[in-house]
Image (cartoon, helix red, strand yellow):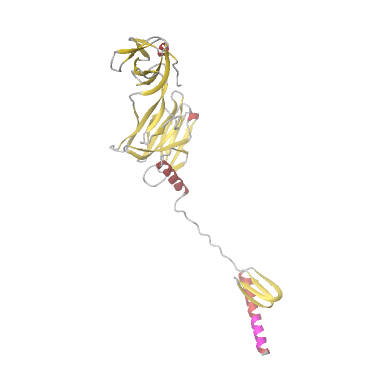
Amino acid sequence: MYRKMILMLLAISLGICFISSCGRLDSDSSVETTDSTTVQTDGATVQTENTVIQAESTETTVSVETIPSETDSNMDAYDLQARLEAGEIVEIDSGTSVFLDWDNKPDMISIEVDDEKDEYTLHVNDVDANGKMSVSSGISEEIVLVQLKSGIIYNKTAIIVTGYNEDDGPISTFYMYADEQLIQMGTIKSAYGPSEGWCIQKDGNIATLSILTYGPVCWTCFYNQTYIIAEGSEFADRTEYALARVPKDMYPIGMVVESRIPIPIYDSRYSDVSSWTVELGESIILSATDNTDYFYVESLDGSKDGWLKIEGSDILVDDTPMSICDIFYGVWSAG
C-alpha cells in the first residue's frame, strides 16, 4: 500500500514539473508555494499538496478590417437625395457630393471664387462653368440645390449660385448637370429665401419676389414673378435646359395715393370712355399694373374702379403725359 502511494506521489510530481515547464515555454506564468497545490489553466484547476502553479493563458487577437457597404460620401449623398426628394431646398458647402443623374454614382460639386476678377468657376466632377458678378465678395461659396418636379422636368436637380450685382442687386444663376455637361439655364434677379427671394411652388415652378426696375413710371415696386425650366431633348449632342419667365397679365401693387389734380379714369384698357374722375385731394388705390401700358385703380371703399393709361415713363391725363409724382402724393419707392 505504501509502495502504491509513493508511486502515485512520484507520478503527480512528474506531471506537475511537466505542466510548469510548458507554462514557462508558452506563456507568462507565476509559481507560489502554499500549503496546497493548485494548477489553473484556461479555467481548469488541479489541486495538490504544498505547491500552487498558475499558468496564464495566452490570447491571440486577429484584426479583421470591416468594409462598409457604402462609403461615407455615398451615405451623405443618399441623405441629400432624400431631402431633395422631400421638396427641401438644400444649401451645401463646396466639395459636397450629391446624385445629379441616374448612374447611382455621387457627383462632386465645388466652386472657386476669383476675388480680383469678380468671377467664379462652378465644378461638377471634371466639368466646369464660369460666371461673373460685379461684386466678388457677394458671391456665396455655399451652393443651393433644388429638385424640380413640374412638367417634363421631373426629379431633375438644379444647381444655383447666388450672389450680388451692383446694378441688379441679389441674383441667382441656375445650372443643370446633364449628359456630363454643365448647362447655364439663366439668372433670376432675386436671392434665395422663402420670405425674401425665390422659392419653389408645389407645382414645381420657381416663384420669385423680383424688383420692377425704374420704368415704365418713375418709381419701383415689388411683384411676384413665376419661372419654369424648359427642356428640349431632340438635339444631336445634348439636352437643352433654359430658365423661362412666365409673364402675368397684371402684377399687384397695393399703393394708396392722394390726387394732386383731377384725373379721369377709363372704364377699360380698350376704351377711351371715362365715367369716373378722381377729384383733387381724393385718395385712391393703385392696385396693379401690367408693367407696360396701364394701372388698375380702385376707390378706397371699392365701389369704383378703372384704368390709368401709361405712356413711356408718364401717365396720360386728358391725353397729356405727366409724371406720376406730379399727379399723386404718396408715391413710394421699393428700392
Q: Position of residue 21 (x, y in %)?
A: 64, 74
Instruction: Please identify the quarter of the rendering in which residue 211 is found.
Output: top left
Q: Position of residue 331 (x, y in %)?
A: 44, 16
Q: Report the residue at 41% width, 41% height from top.
A: 84
Above or below: residue 148 compared with residue 290: below
Q: Report the residue at 31% width, 12% height from top.
A: 274
Most frequent secondary structure within the magenta stretch: helix
| Residue bounds of the magenta highlight | 4-12
Q: Which of the two residues, 201 or 66, is positioned nearer the viewer here?
A: 201
Instruction: Please identify the quarter of the rendering in which residue 310 is found.
Output: top left
Is 126 situated left or right of 14 in this image?
A: left
Q: Position of residue 301 (x, y in %)?
A: 39, 19
Picture mark count: 0
Above or below: residue 109 compared with residue 256: below
Whether residue 61 is visible:
yes
Q: Is residue 6 magenta?
A: yes
Q: Which quadrant of the rendered structure holds the N terminus?
A: bottom right
Is 90 situated left or right of 276 in this image?
A: right
Q: Which of the two residues, 45 or 179, is positioned nearer the viewer here?
A: 45
Q: Is residue 212 magenta?
A: no
Above or below: residue 224 compared with residue 63: above
Whether residue 181 is visible:
no
Q: Position of residue 288 (x, y in %)?
A: 37, 21
Instruction: Please identify the quarter of the rendering in which residue 169 is found.
Output: top left
